[in-house]
Amino acid sequence: MSNKYIDVIIAGFGGQGVMLIGNLLAYSGMESGLNVTYMPEYGPEMRGGTANCTVVVASEEIGSPIIKTPKSLIIMNQPSLDKFLPRIEQGGLAVVNSSLVDCSGADVRNARIVQVPANEIADQLGNAKMANMVALGAYIESTGALSMEVVSRALKNVIAPHYAHLIPKNAAALEAGAEYVRKNMQV
């Protein structure tokens, strides 16, 4: 296996499912036989406050879970764009929820910005709460970080058993985000 290294900061408001998709990415890395770190960070308000997590997935040992200059971002709200985009590595990738985030005027630092209307896509699927899965699907498609099949399979590890009936809908939201990127972006 070739060396693989992915780091991403996922950020948004509490209640947007930021921690859920970070957890899903981490489980997917483990299911792929890779080393993983997952580090959540909550604002004091919880729901509606700020939330972010850092996920590192690598074939080699991970020296630190703390990433000062991330290679990639998943941004779900405007305050997160303002906070984390200036830190992104030169030439990095940011998947941005364009439903809630305006990138005009942002310092993109020669980063590649993939704007995905995650809320609108989730609404079309019948559940606005799945915007997080749409964004993660767009990220997986944009980076090739992990296999979409593995990510979909790992849903059972992060969705509580009493919500197991929502796994197919979440898998569909992941695929919808990936499909949006395939149709609308040069990857």
Image (spheres, rainbow, N blue to C red):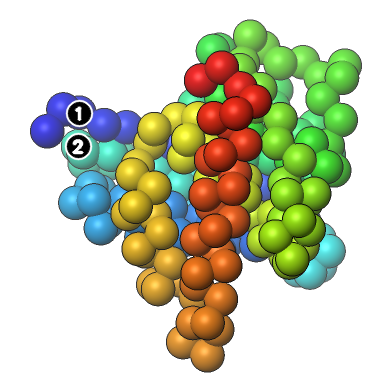
Tell me, yes or no, whether the two marked residues, 2 and 1, touch with CB atoms within 8 Å.
yes
In this picture, residue 14 sits left or right of residue 111:
right
Decide which of 131, 13 is in the foreground and name it: 131
Instruction: Work out how far the residue at label 2 is from the one at label 1, CA to CA, in angstroms.
Output: 7 Å
Foreground disc of the pair 2, 1: 1
- Furthest residue toward bottom: 162
The x and y percentages for residue 27 are 36, 60
Q: Secondary structure at mark 1?
A: loop
Q: Residue sitting at 61 percent across and 16 percent down? A: 111
Q: Residue at x 45, y 30 (%)?
A: 143
x and y, in percent, of residue 56 in the image? 39, 43
- The image shows residue 72, relative to residue 156, as above or below, that is above
Secondary element at image label 2: loop
Seen in the picture, residue 124 relative to 138 is either above or below; the reply is below
Tell me if mark 2 has few (under 14), some (14-19) or many (20+) residues whose alpha carbon lies within 10 angstroms of its own: few
Q: Is residue 19 left or right of residue 115?
A: left
| Mark 1 neighbour class, 10 Å CA radius: few under 14, some 14 to 19, many 20 or more | few
**Residue at figure coordinates x 41%, y 59% from the top left:** 152
**Could you say which disc has been placed on residue 3 in the image?**
1
Q: Is residue 26 above or below residue 102?
A: below
Q: Which mark is residue 60?
A: 2
- Residue 96: % across, % down: 70, 35
Query: What's under tag 2, amino acid-wise?
Result: Glu
Whether residue 66 can be seen here: no
Q: Position of residue 45 (x, y in %)?
A: 81, 67
Q: Quadrant of residue 107?
A: top right
